Image (cartoon, helix red, strand yellow):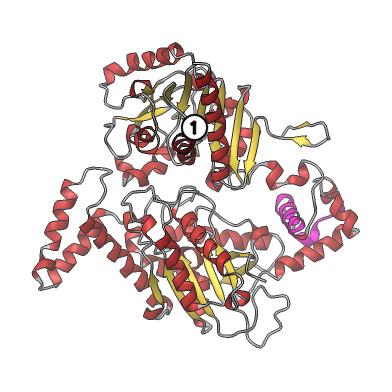
Amino acid sequence: MNADFDHVGQKIFEKIDTSIYPDATKASALVAKEIGNLINARNQTGQNTVLGLATGSTPLQVYSELIRLHEEEGLSFKRVITFNLDEYYPIKPEELQSYVRFMNENLFDHIDIKRKNIHIPDGTLSKDKVYEYCRNYEQKIEEAGGLDVQILGIGRTGHIGFNEPGSLEKTRTRLVTLDDLTRTDAAASFYGEEHVPRQAITMGVGTILKAKKIYLMAWGTTKAKVVQDTVEGQITDQIPATYLQKHDNTKVILDEAAASELTRRKTPWLVGPCKWDEKMIKRAVTWLSLSCGKPILKLTDEDYNQNGMSDILFEYGRAYNVNIHIFNVVQHTITGWPGGKPNADDTNRPERATPFPKKVLIFSPHPADDMISMGGTLMRLVEHGHEVHVVYQTTGNIAVYDDEALRYADFISQYRLNSSDKDLFKKITKLVESKQPGDIDAPEMLELKTNIRKAEARSACRYSGISEKNIHFLEMSFYETGRERKNRLSDEDIQSIRDIIHKIKPHQIYAAGDLSDPHGTHRLCWNAIEMVLHEMKDEGWAQDCFVWLYRGVWQDLDVSEIDMAVPLSPGERLKKRRAIFKHASQKDQPKYPGTISGEFWMAADEKTILHAKNYDKLGLAEYDSIEGFSRWRVISK
């Protein structure tokens, strides 16, 4: 990869101005503030402000902050003219997935913008009118004075708007066919890929590049690779976002997770001098080992010197010394005793030997996340005699297919003698028949789907040896919207976490520490746990509690981030797979983009096998598979 140098001699790999923020909330606030300042300045001189707007989860917090600026600081949108990037085709404006509805619910209904100043592509046109409509859309942008600001997200295909791979630099507003990956990513919102429109009307790349200023925002690790390709790679029509390298006033705004593949974050030693602490040295040496295709103990001074890591040799003297040290550090993460080994020297083990047995609290955002992400470790903890509790934070009901609900309703109707039960199948059948694609489920349907997920979770727990009294369902209210988009955490949600932790007072907590989607269920579930743990960090039990974080199948730990590696035998991996099978209503759900397989058990296998292969490549023992955990250290000593 080619790189320039800045004035202090550091290599510059990024070809677009890129800023990284701790999280999406802080980043979004900055973008909203800059847009608000522009609107205020234009308002004072009697000028209009023309905004190009995007949809999806990425700009949601920007819109929330703009609403706050309007309501609390008097920001007026009366002189603002907006043009949305795109819209599905065909789609009616009142449909749940319509971008007209999205913009109204998330911005326009809450500000003082004039309705005549809002422009969103029309998804109801007949095909013969689309071409002329698109031409007029371009003309309206020109008549408004051009876009002052364009907000963009980025798709995993590298699309901006719906400009899919193959889009050319000078394209204008037009009807396009959506990429299969784009439709797969949208499947959850449409309750099945078969309901996702195959086409969309979108502004073209050329239209976007004519904006005076562009903000490209991205949150989460699922966007990290395409962000790196966009910011550091070559310009190509296969990643349309790379055309932004030609724009003189584009700012890329990222959270830490989305920035994780950028050279300055992933391998900062290639950029210039960096601060070498133990964590950074482990990261660099494991990267060097995997990059060179050599076990850690075979790395040479030349390998270090040629890869920007000569400073490590200065501290350690030679490659041999640092190799031995990091090899031992990685080796000490491996344990077959995730709850600690009794009557053993635990000096170099990731977990304490005492107390034994331990009280273990496993948080699972949805039913199934526990088995998919750490099923083998869970079973090992049970086998070793620990008191294992599983806490399912949400119902996960919207992930259940309608035909699964019908199957359960049919069984209940046939088996039970109660008249209301006998009528259940007829009632559910009518609800399914009257339901339009994207409609929110009726309360009766959601209740049935909730019970399906609970039954599956209990079945998997029983199979794994967990006592019925140790299975807990919180049904956190933020999730219960009946749709993909969730509400904010409520006080009741936080209190439910407080209550279960106070009740158990665990020695170990396992939780999903995902950063992949700032508005997703995993992120909100961890936010609630983290908030409570900060509150409790000075309590006596908390001083003796280790917190271990696992990741969902769409986001993984780098080998250098693993603080505890639990090897599984082929038989244990098979048993874990069977526990996942208990969650039958989840089979083939397209919920986890980025995995090779659409099925949970295959995705789980792929991740654990990859961990084992990486440990093998580093020169450690060869295992069938490994479940990896990082340690959260705010209360862990």
Q: Position of residue 170 (x, y in %)?
A: 51, 17
- Relative to residue 592, is residue 452 drawn left or right? left
Query: To which residue does mark 1 refer?
Result: 159
Residue 201 occupies quadrant: top left
539 versus 220 height, above or below = below
User: Is residue 169 at least partly visible in the picture?
Assistant: no
Q: Main secondary structure of the magenta part?
A: helix
284 versus 335 height, above or below = above
- Relative to residue 264, is residue 28 drawn left or right? left
Assess disc 1: are there few (<14), some (14-19) or many (≥20) residues with their C-alpha within 10 Å of its C-alpha.
many
- For the point 56% across and 47% down, the residue is 221
Image quadrant where one finds the C terminus: bottom right
- For the point 58% across and 67% down, the residue is 548
User: Is residue 79 at least partly visible in the picture?
Assistant: yes
Q: Position of residue 271 (x, y in %)?
A: 77, 41
Residue 236 occupies quadrant: top right
- For the record, the magenta segment spans 279-302
- For the point 38% across and 21% down, the residue is 117
Residue 231 occupies quadrant: top right
Q: Residue furthest left?
A: 419
Q: Is residue 299 magenta?
A: yes
Q: Nearer the viewer, residue 216 or 25?
A: 25
Q: Nearer the viewer, residue 550 or 535?
A: 535
536 versus 280 height, above or below = below
Q: Position of residue 314 (x, y in %)?
A: 90, 54
Q: Position of residue 222 (x, y in %)?
A: 53, 46
Q: Amino acid at mark 1?
A: His
Q: Is residue 406 magenta?
A: no
